[in-house]
Every structure is written in C-alpha cells, then in structure tokens.
Amino acid sequence: MTRSTLMKASAAVIALFMLASCANTIRGVGRDAANTVNATEAAGRSVARAAN
C-alpha cells in the first residue's frame, strides 16, 4: 500500500467510528430523556396520591 492509500483508508475507518459513536450518543440521550419523563410522571402520581 502506498502512503496515500493508507491515509485514505485510515481516514475512512476513523470516520466510520465517529459516525457509530454519534449514533450511540443520540440513542443514549433519547433513553435518558425517556427515563426523565418516566421519573417525572411517577413523581407526579406519588404527589397526587399523597394529596388525596
């Protein structure tokens, strides 16, 4: 392999890893947001039960 080809291949592999990392981060943020909503709803139900 020439140096130029090796550099291009390395850049492509790094770009693929970065894209995969971004996808995992976006999924993780989505899960965290869903968990926050669920926890807020549960707290609201607890307060409503306590008020009755």
Image (spheres, helix red, strand yellow):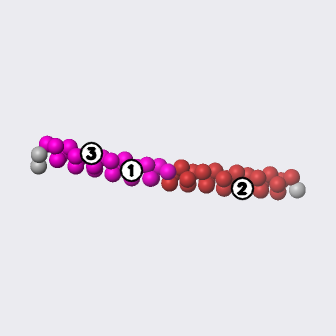
Nearer-the-camera pick, 49 or 32:
32
Say which element carries label 1.
Answer: helix
Nearer-the-camera pick, 26 or 43:
26
Residue 36 is labelled as: none
Range drawn in magenta: 3-26
Q: Quadrant of residue 7?
A: top left
Which quarter of the image is occupied by the C terminus? bottom right
Under mark 3, the amino acid is: Ala
Residue at the spot x=72%, y=55% of the render? 41
Say which element carries label 3.
Answer: helix
Dot 1: few (<14), some (14–19), or many (≥20) neighbours within 10 Å? few
Question: Label 3, label 1: how many angstroms apart (C-alpha)?
Answer: 12 Å
Q: Position of residue 39 (x, y in %)?
A: 67, 53
Q: Disc 2 designates what residue?
A: 42
Residue 11 is labelled as: 3
Question: Label 3, label 2: how many angstroms apart (C-alpha)?
Answer: 47 Å
Nearer-the-camera pick, 20 or 41:
20
Q: Position of residue 48 (x, y in %)?
A: 82, 54
Q: Earlier in the sequence, mark 3 or mark 2?
A: 3
Residue at the spot x=39%, y=52% of the render? 20
Q: Disc 1 designates what residue?
A: 19
Q: Is residue 20 left or right of residue 33?
A: left
Quick check: marks 1 and 2 in contact, CB under 8 Å? no
Residue at the spot x=66%, y=53% of the render? 37
Q: Earlier in the sequence, mark 3 or mark 1?
A: 3
Decide whether the magenta segment is chiefly helix, strand or loop. Answer: helix
Residue at the spot x=27%, y=45% of the render? 11
